Amino acid sequence: MKKHEIAIGILGATGVVGTEMCKVLEERNVPCASLRLLADKSEAGKKVIFRGKELVVEEATDDSFDGLDILLVAVSDAVSRRFSPVAAAKGVVVIDNSSAYRMDPDVPLVVPEVNPQDISWHKGIIANPNCSTIIALVAVHALHQAHPIKRMIVSTYQAVSGAGINGLKELEEQAADYASGRPISENKVFQHQIAFNLIPHIDAFQDNGYTKEELKMLNEGRKILHVPNLDITCTCVRVPVLRSHSESIYLEFHEKVSVQEARELISAAAGTKLVDEPDKNVYPMPLDTSNQDLVFVGRVRQDLTEEKAIDLWCCGDQIRKGAATNAVQIAELIIAQKWG
């Protein structure tokens, strides 16, 4: 029998995450006989090099998904809701990086290192979690497996690239203005000047005083870990860092967990790298975690206020593991499951 030739598409291929998806597919040598790059009409005609060949970006239409096996989606919620069901109805497995379907009970929400088994019950669409959720859960999952988590308190320090290419440009322009002695450019992407500033506001505020971004950690974390009543609270802060999110995490367990065991579990966990030698000034930092796929974990220590709690610090590239790579890893699982 002739081996199936897998056809993959990327919807939103010219954006920050879509571009990274293309790069990760090539880096990981994902079996892919053909790659179709799709985007808005305004982006059609752009050219991308993939595995040494020039591919032309096409305008996304309802007919764009014919013949595809897998579609990686890196567009807004609205565009995903427009096209993802169309592709799924054609038998394409859709892996969606938007938040459109994350909390849909009929759609698996998957981090391959944490809950790969959930892929088995998809009905055409699989959701990619929020970047901060992915980074946090990869960092703590091994601990949770050994000692179920009772409560998490998380503070995120999120890079400007989480707001897309315009977020990057705004920080770079404002920093250049400052260095040149010019007035700081007006903020257009963020609520306030981002250069040399911190903004405790990502996404819209809700009636309970939390932002949508903060509630993603709560709701997505519970769904992925299959612990519907897990106590999670989160504060999300935008920081003047170009790439890679950082997180301070308090983990409270039902029993005491030693720092040594926590370090051993993290060190052996899939997708993590223990970077924890504070006496040598060695700990996770955004500069070190950018442009790679591991979540670095360090500053592991016993909490001073609760003997059953551990505190840690982690960093991960939110464009790669927090978005593009996680989606590609899901695609790899689908390929292994369906075509061996």
Image (tube, rainbow, N blue to C red):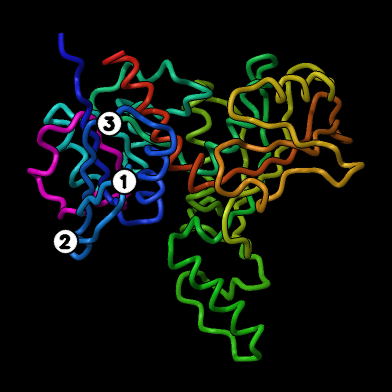
Q: Which residue is mark 1?
A: 52
- Mark 3 residue element: loop
Query: Given the image, on which type of amino acid does mark 1 rest?
Result: Gly
Q: Residue at x 54, y 61 (%)?
A: 160
Q: Which residue is mark 2?
A: 41
Q: Residue at x 61, y 91 (%)?
A: 182
On whether residue 76 falls in the magenta region, the answer is yes
CA separation in Å, label 1 and label 3: 14 Å
Segment tinted magenta in the rendering: 57-79
On whether residue 67 falls in the magenta region, the answer is yes
Mark 3 or 2, nearer chain start: 3
Q: Nearer the viewer, mark 3 or mark 2?
A: 3
Q: Quadrant location of the N terminus?
A: top left
Q: Residue at x 47, y 50 (%)?
A: 212
Residue 266 rendering spot, x and y as whole percentages: 70, 25
Q: Which residue is mark 3?
A: 32
Q: Residue at x 43, y 28 (%)?
A: 110
CA separation in Å, label 3 and label 2: 25 Å
Up-down: is 332 above or below 179?
above
The residue positioned farthest toward the left in the image shown? 63
Query: Given the image, on which type of amino acid does mark 3 rest?
Result: Cys
Mark 1 or 2, nearer chain start: 2
> CB atoms at circles 1 and 2 under 8 Å apart?
no
Up-down: is 178 above or below 172?
below
Query: Given the image, on which type of amino acid does mark 2 rest?
Result: Lys
Dot 3, crowdedness within 10 Å: few (<14), some or many (≥20)? Answer: some
Residue 227 rendering spot, x and y as whole percentages: 54, 22
Mark 1 or 3, nearer chain start: 3
